[in-house]
Amino acid sequence: MSRRLSIFAHGDSDGVASAAIAVAALKREYDDIRIYFSHPAGLYDDLNELYNSGSDLIILDIALNESHLSNLLEKFEYISRRNNLVYIDHHPEPLGLRIKDLPGQVFHDINSSTSELTYRFFEEYLDYDMVRVALYGAISDYLDETSWVKRMLEYWDKRDIYYEAGVLSQGLEGSRRLYDFKRHVVRHLSENRLPSMLSELLVRALIERVNNEELRKWVKKNVIKKNYLAYVIDPPGSLGKAALYSRAIADTLVGVAISKREKIAEMSLRARRNTVDLNVILRKITPRLNGCGGGHSFAAGARVPLDRLEEFLDKLESELEKTS
C-alpha cells in the first residue's frame, strides 16, 4: 500500500520554507506528498475539505484560533488515532490551551521561526545544505537572532543568504493567492535550489519591491491617525507592509492595514517591539465582535465583521491606551 502525506502550511516565506524542508526530509518515505496552504481562521474548514483521511498529516506555521478551537482539537484527536500527526509552530498558544497537550507530535517554540523548528525536527533526514532554506524562512519572519540562526550563518556568506531570503519573501508577497505557484516554489526549494534560480519568483520579487515603494508613498498620503494607532483602508499592496508603514509614518504604537472583503474586514497589525502584545489584545477583543485574531506580540492579524470595524478600532485604541 502506498504511503501518503498531507502538508498544511502557511503561505508566507516561513511556511513555504518549512514545507520545503519537510518534503526534502520525507520524499523517500512517502509515495504521494500533497501540499496545501491555510491560515488560522481557515484551518478547520480546510482540513474538513481537503485532508485525505488515509494520509499522515503535518501542519506547519499555522496558529490555532479560538473561534473553532474545540472542533479543531476533536479533528486532531480523530486524525492522530488513525494516522501520524505532526504539528510544528512558533505562534503563541491560544488562550486556555497548552500546545504540548495537543494530540500527535508537537514541536513548539515562540522564540524561533517554524522553518528553524522544522529543520531541527527533521535534521537527521536532511542534507546539511538544506539549512539554507531554514535560514531563508527565519530571516523572512524576523527571527534571525536566535542562537541557532547565528551559529548556522557562520557557515555561509550571510550576504548571499539574506539576498536569497529577500527574493523569497518579496516574491511570495507578490504571489499571495497563487497556490499552484507556491507549490512549485516548495518543490524548487526542497531540491535545495536557490530562490533566485527560479526566474518567475525573481521577477515577482523585483515587481513587488517597486510596488512596495509606491505603497509607502500611498500610505503617507492616506494614513489615518488616532492617538495610539494609525490605519489605512484597502491599501494597494501587502497588508503587512502597509501596517508597518502606517505605524512608522504616523509614529504610533500600532499600525493597522484593513482590507474590506464583502462582509469581512481582514487586517494586518504591526507594533513597536517590546511595547504591546498584539496577540493577547486581539485574542481578547475579537471574539467579542464575532471575529478572530492573534499572532505574535509585534505582528498579528485579525478578522471582524465589516459592520463592526469601527467598534474594533475603538476597542483596540482603548486597549492600547491601557497598556501604554
Image: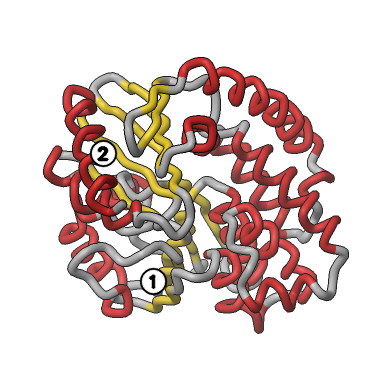
255 lies above or below 133: above
Expressed as whole percent of the image width and height from the top left, the position of residue 311 reads 17, 30
Query: Circle 2 sits in a helix, a strand or a loop, which is it?
Result: helix
Horizontal placement of 228 versus 242: left or right?
left
| Residue matched to label 2 | 317
99 lies above or below 274: below
Inspect the image, locate mark 2, and give the three-letter code of the amino acid beneath it: Glu
Choose between 284 and 199: the one closer to the eye: 284
Q: Earlier in the sequence, mark 2 or mark 1?
A: 1
Name the residue: 73% across, 37% down: 201
In which quadrant of the rendered view does residue 14 lie? bottom right
Query: Circle 1 sits in a helix, a strand or a loop, which is it?
Result: strand
Expressed as whole percent of the image width and height from the top left, the position of residue 173 reads 60, 36
Point out which mark residue 99 bears. Answer: none
Inspect the image, locate mark 1, and give the three-letter code of the amino acid beneath it: Leu
Horizontal placement of 8 versus 140: left or right?
left
In the picture as drawn, the residue positioned furthest to the left comes out as 288
Name the residue: 74% across, 68% down: 130
Expressed as whole percent of the image width and height from the top left, the position of residue 190 reads 70, 59
Mark 1, Cα crowd under 10 Å, few <14 / some 14-19 / many 20+, is: many
| Residue matched to label 1 | 85
